[in-house]
Amino acid sequence: MSPVMAYLSIGAVRADAVFASGLQRRDEPSAGQVRQAVAAAIRAFGWSGCAGRVAQEFGDHPETAVIRMRWARGVAREAFADWPPEPGPGADAGGLLVIRPRLPAEQAPGSPGAGRLVARR
């Protein structure tokens, strides 16, 4: 069986991180607190670890997990609504988290000599 590659939107990753964090709805966290909690959760568990915690909770307590995920999606969307997109290789991916291989320096876009043929002896 071959491995499956998942493409997650950055919004889904952020919602999973809020879900996996220690933030609570009753605390009414600010946008800054949400962004900080997302960063801490991803640092601590990784994006797949956050997703795993979400899956575990949906398996153990589906009724409450639905409510928490609805809240997590909303606060993550609000906290990052005015967040500027990060420039870089994945900026044009339409909101998907894309991991691309590194190219050798001579093939990287924007590098001196990119696109030119080099005569080898």
Image (tube, grey):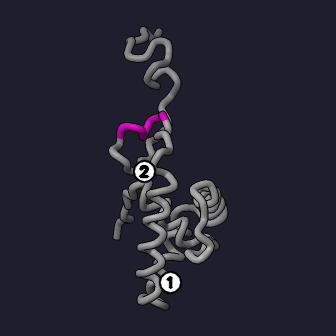
- Which residue is at the front of the view, 47 or 76? 76
Residue under the image location 63 percent in, 59 percent down: 33
Disc 2 packing (10 Å; few <14; some 14–19; many ≥20)? some
Residue 19 falls left or right of residue 95: right
Q: Is residue 27 magenta?
A: no
Residue 93: mark = none
Q: Amino acid at mark 2?
A: Leu
Res. 5 image quadrant = bottom left
Mark 1–mark 2 distance (CA, rounded to whole Å): 23 Å
Residue 97: mark = 2
Above or below 63: residue 13 = above
Q: Amino acid at mark 1?
A: Glu
Image coordinates of residue 112 in percent, x first then y, are 49, 13
State the extent of the magenta-drawn residues as a range.
87-92
Image coordinates of residue 99 in percent, x first then y, are 45, 47
Residue under the image location 62 percent in, 54 percent down: 32
* SS majority, magenta: loop
Tag 2 secondary structure? loop
- Which residue is at the front of the view, 90 or 4? 90
Residue pointed to by mark 1: 57
